[in-house]
Amino acid sequence: MATPDKSTLQQIPVGIWVLGFVSMLMDISSEMIHSLLPLFMVTTLGASAFAVGLVEGLAESTALIVKIFSGAFSDYLGKRKGLAVFGYAMGALTKPLFAVASTTGMVLTARLLDRVGKGIRGAPRDALVADIAPSNLRGASFGLRQSLDTVGAFLGPLLAVGLMLLWTNDFRAVFWVAVIPGLMAVALLFFGVREPEQRQATKRTYPIRCENLKRLGGPYWWVVSIGAVFTLARFSEAFLVLRAQQGGVPVALVPLVMVAMNLVYALSAYPFGKLSDRMNHRTLLALGLIVLIAADLVLATNDHWSVVLAGVALWGIHMGITQGLLATMVADTAPADLRGTAYGFFNLVSGLAMLLASVLAGLLWDRLGASFTFYAGAAFCIISLLGLVWHR
């Protein structure tokens, strides 16, 4: 089995690897902050779980909504890299705002600006991956980029834990350190990725037009609908951090929850991405929902650290199964010249679903408790799974 794996990795273009390492560095930067941010808001700024859910929902949905415009603009320009560099630079330069924030409103402002940067870079970067990757290796390429991205997502919290222990829970000092890998990501993308030449249309038009939306077709819009359903069933990961805190885990060690989730995510994203190149996509999506149901039920039953760790690991497997797969399905169902627009609309709908899911989760948490929040997530997953099985 080792030889085919090695052969597949060797066939993946260098540009995909570089984009993966760019994502890894930026995720180190972002997750150093995001793994501590719910605790910072609750313990230092005195915010409620509803406020945490509102900030996270608005932030993540903002990023996803902005992607529609950046993706469409990259199609119009016929270029992806410039927008991606701008988005990564904006994300890196907003990190100091977290270190100086003194109110929940300032945190929200910093979070929104940071996610606008993510929104600007996200769709052009995904379209760039699809442009660079050979069609027969598209699932493996998206899986590899997602795996490297997620390596950063567990190294960031791990570094945050070490610095919190070293500096006696100094949140702001850790936030300042997070600026460094963000700037490194921008430099690597600028100097390390060569954009492939795009075939230019005889007449350049802005992609968000009725005729272009019709060209996207039914299969693409089905993928968009499925992505929204998955997002509704999976609220913000900030609630995983709060669940760990309920179990009595020391503040400095709580980010290890995100380390565990992202380690599992990183290890599973590439194998499942490769599997998606030769396995029925609907079956894999159903498997992802079943794993998320299991994660919700485990997290709902108990807040002991060992139980939370098991639920978080299942959550990571779900992410590894579904996230690269959905990106691959968008690329497979959209015309090449509209890929940026396709990723943009996909993320617009998912962004609205993320906002609704996170706000609802925060309300349920404050009024009915953490267990009810996760039971509600499991119930929505079951409804989604039934819908997926029923729709042929």
Image (cartoon, grey):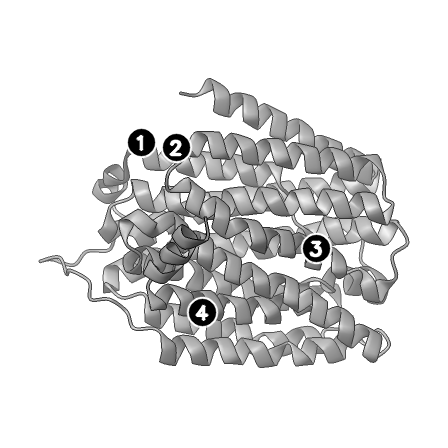
The residue sitting at 86% across, 77% down in the picture is 168
Q: Secondary structure at mark 2?
A: helix
The residue singled out by tag 4 in the image is: 87
Residue type at mark 1? Gly
Q: Which mark is residue 218?
A: 1
Q: Residues within 10 Å of mark 3 (few under 14, many from 20)?
A: many
Quote the CA–CA distance across marks 4 and 1. Answer: 31 Å
Q: Residues within 10 Å of mark 4 (few under 14, many from 20)?
A: many
Q: Say what amino acid the circle numbered 3 marks.
A: Ala
Tell me residue 119's x, y (percent).
Answer: 47, 60
Circles 2 and 1: CB atoms closer than 8 Å: yes
Q: Amino acid at mark 2?
A: Trp
For label 3, the residue is: 260
Q: Position of residue 88 (x, y in %)?
A: 47, 71
Mark 3 or mark 2: name the one nearer the start of the chain: 2
Q: CA distance from mark 4 to mark 2?
A: 28 Å
Circle 1 SS class: helix
Q: Which residue is the extreme one toward the right? A: 248
Q: CA distance from mark 3 to mark 4?
A: 28 Å
Q: Earlier in the sequence, mark 3 or mark 1?
A: 1
Tag shown at residue 222:
2
**Amino acid at dot 4:** Gly
Q: Secondary structure at mark 4?
A: helix
Disc 3 + disc 1, Cβ < 8 Å: no
